[in-house]
Every structure is written in C-alpha cells, then in structure tokens.
Image (spheres, grey):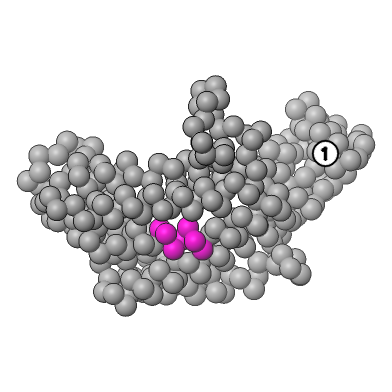
Amino acid sequence: MNTNPILAPWTTPFGAPPFPAIRPEHFSPAFAQGMAEHLAEIEAIAANPAPPSFDNTIVAMERSGRTLGRTGALFGNLVSSHGNPALQAVEREMAPKLADHGSRVALHPALFARVAALHEARATLGLDPDQLRLLERSHLGFVRAGAALDDAGRTHMAAINTRLATLHTAFGQNVLHDEREWAMALDTAALSGLPDFVVEGARQAAAERGQDGHVVTLSRSLIEPFLTFSPRRDLRQAAWAAWVARGMHEGAHDNRPLIPEILALRAERARLLGFPHFAAFRL
C-alpha cells in the first residue's frame, strides 16, 4: 500500500483530500510520480501507430495526467491559502521542474504532429461544436507554446519557460511575505462604522498574531472590506499604500530586481513566436 496520502486512494467523505495526513514532504514524490505517469501517457499517445483521431489524441490528452492534476490542484490550494516556509520550499523546488515537464508535453514534436493533422482536417471530421472548439483551442495552445518552432526554437522556449517559472515563484512569494508581515492596529475609534464581520475579522487577525485588540492585515479577505467600509480616510490611505507596495521594499523580498528579467524574457518569448512584443502576444 502506498504510504503517501496524496497518492493513496482518498476514502474521506466526498473524496476530499485527507488534509490532516498530508505533510509538505509528501508533495515532491507525488509530483515526481505524477509527472512520470503523465509523460508515459503522452509518449503512448504520440507513438500510437493508429492514424490520429479525436478520441485517440485529443480525448486521450484530456484524460491524461490525473495524478499530476490532482496533486497540483491540492498543492496550489494549500500553498495559496496556508502557505508556510516548508510548502514554499517545495514550491521553489518544483516550479522549474513542473515548467520543464510542461515544456516536454507542449513542445513534443510527435504529439503536435497528431494535433496539427487533426486541425488541418477538422472540417471533414464531423465533430460536434464542442469537440471542434476543443480541437481548435488545443492546437492554438500548442502553437502559442512554441510547438511549431524548429528544434533550436523549442529548446530556447523551454529554457525561457523554466527560468520564468523560477522568477514568478520568487515574485509571488515575496508579495506573500509582505502581506503577512504588515499589520495596522485599530483602536476603538477606528472600529466605528465597520460592519460586525470586519470587526470580528480584525479581532481574529490580532489573535492569530498573539495580540489583544484588533488589527487590519493585507489578507484580501480583510483588506478589501476594510477599504470598502472604513469611514477613516487616513487609515484607508495607509492600508492602500501598504497593499500596493507589496514586494517593493529593500532586502531579500524585493521584487524590483526581478522585474527587468521577467519583462525581458516575456519579450523574448513573444519575439520567438513572431510577435513584436509581449502585449501583442497576450492580446
């Protein structure tokens, strides 16, 4: 029996993840197994000796990667809602590996050849409107990922994707660090005019920090209603200024050194795909 609760069958009510049993150290091996299974499935689809069809190519791709998808959805939920240093370390470890895996799938020449053949013949396949839409979007996704590039272009694209994954992870973690570090104490007068649920949220936020009274933090569930309902312009201004300054403080969590490289790599990726700049690619 698999002792990794992520990979073992989930017997919890409604098939929910067994959260109490899951530890940060379970994710790396679960991701590794998920990527290995997914790549094996992709290789089997690409090497299928039968002519490409909607079922043996598009549907097969849609059904592939179940373990990886389940692991990724679970991890994404936890790292965004309950991210701690251990989970963030896993995120930094896995970001480039997952990007590399995504490139191996999206830039797979034989797999793209099957999708391209179906797309070329799409008017003759007798597909339902939803099937045709899926085929067209799948083909477009491959093209925009760089699958139509030559060998050198695909290699270059994969390297860009891997580096961007690392930079984007660092960027997001820096923002999250600043969200957690900042808090503004609210005295009795500052609570006046706030709805009860905001007051209670501020009390809970203070308790979570081992403090008495009330604080407003940069947690979206607290900062947004505070900015909406607080009648105190000075406090709203202080909270808003802290919100927009996330990741813009000197030190280890400053995103400003990362931004030029992110922008340069995005522009390079766009040019590689034949667009004049990143905005044209996005639009």
Q: Residue at x 56, y 52 (%)?
A: 28
In the displayed structure, would residue 225 be above or below residue 94?
Answer: above
Q: Residue at x 64, y 73 (%)?
A: 257
In the displayed structure, would residue 236 be above or below residue 13?
Answer: below
Tell whether 7 sits left or right of 276: right
For the residue labelled by badge 1, is the local secondary structure a helix, a strand or a loop?
helix
Q: Residue 68 in the image: x percent, y percent?
A: 45, 46
The span picked out in magenta is 96-102
Q: Residues within 10 Å of mark 1 (few under 14, many from 20)?
A: few
Q: Residue furthest left?
A: 124
Q: Residue 229 in the image: x percent, y percent?
A: 73, 35
- Magenta segment's dominant SS is helix
Q: Nearer the viewer, residue 26 or 205?
A: 26
Quadrant of the snapshot with the C terminus: bottom left
Q: Residue at x 40, y 69 (%)?
A: 158
Quadrant in the picture for residue 175? bottom right
In the displayed structure, would residue 156 be above or below residue 196?
Answer: below
> Does the rendering let one see residue 183?
yes
> Does the rendering let one see residue 228?
no
Tell whether 106 sits left or right of 168: left
In the displayed structure, would residue 267 be above or below residue 20?
Answer: below
> Pointer 1: what residue?
208
Q: Nearer the viewer, residue 111 or 235?
A: 111
